Image (cartoon, rainbow, N blue to C red):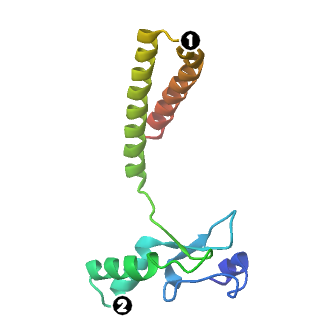
Amino acid sequence: MERLLDLLGSEDEILLADGFDQALIGHAAGMEPRAVYDYDRCITVLVQGGMTYEEAVEYFEFNTVGAYVGEQTPVFVRQIDPEDSHALLRKLIFTATRFLDYVQEKLVDEEQATGIRYRAELADMSSALRKSREVLKEGE
């Protein structure tokens, strides 16, 4: 915690969420110093304090996440499980591929001058999607 406060600056310069020291995971880079907390760890802190899971989520969402106290309001992040992120990437690649196929089909049907101009860009996007698919398969 002390090392993190050194990175963030003095406690006078940042806002910390009271009672959630165990859930502090870092700071937001590239902006005003902002403390970053793990959302799920915050819920765990509340449950360990005696709330049910549902009570903890409701309390946390309303009183902590929903409280804007200026530019230095802490950030609460939910980490994505790697399996969930792979499924999300597969869905995104599938949807983007279908969209590109649709656009290319429309351009061929209409043979507009603007269509010719965008063919190279569509080819680049298709290539990027193919590479993304390959990288995703390698990671599985």
Q: Quadrant of the C terminus?
A: top left
Question: First in sequence: mark 2 or mark 1?
Answer: 2
Question: Hey, what amino acid is under mark 2?
Answer: Gly
Coordinates of residue 70 in the picture (x, y in percent)? 59, 78
> Where is 7 relative to 84, above or below?
below
Residue displayed at 50% across by 33% down: 132
Write down the quadrant of residue 12 in the picture. bottom right
Question: Could you tell me which secondary element the residue under label 1 belongs to?
Answer: helix
Name the mark on residue 75.
none
Question: Could you tell me which secondary element the residue under label 2 belongs to?
Answer: loop
Coordinates of residue 75 in the picture (x, y in percent)? 54, 71
Question: Circle 2 is placed at which residue position?
Answer: 49
Please tell me how many numbered marks the rendered image carries. Answer: 2
Label 2 Cα neighbours within 10 Å, binned few <14 / some 14-19 / many ≥20: few
> Where is 10 relative to 40, above or below?
below
> Where is 140 relative to 72, above or below?
above
- Residue placed most toward the observer, 108 or 23: 108
Residue displayed at 41% across by 16% down: 106
Question: Hey, what amino acid is under mark 1?
Answer: Ala
Residue displayed at 35% across by 86% down: 48
Question: Circle 1 is placed at which residue position?
Answer: 113
- Residue placed most toward the observer, 81 or 89: 89
Query: In the picture provided, is 31 more to the left or to the right than 128?
Result: right
Q: Label 2 to label 1, Cα distance in Å?
A: 66 Å
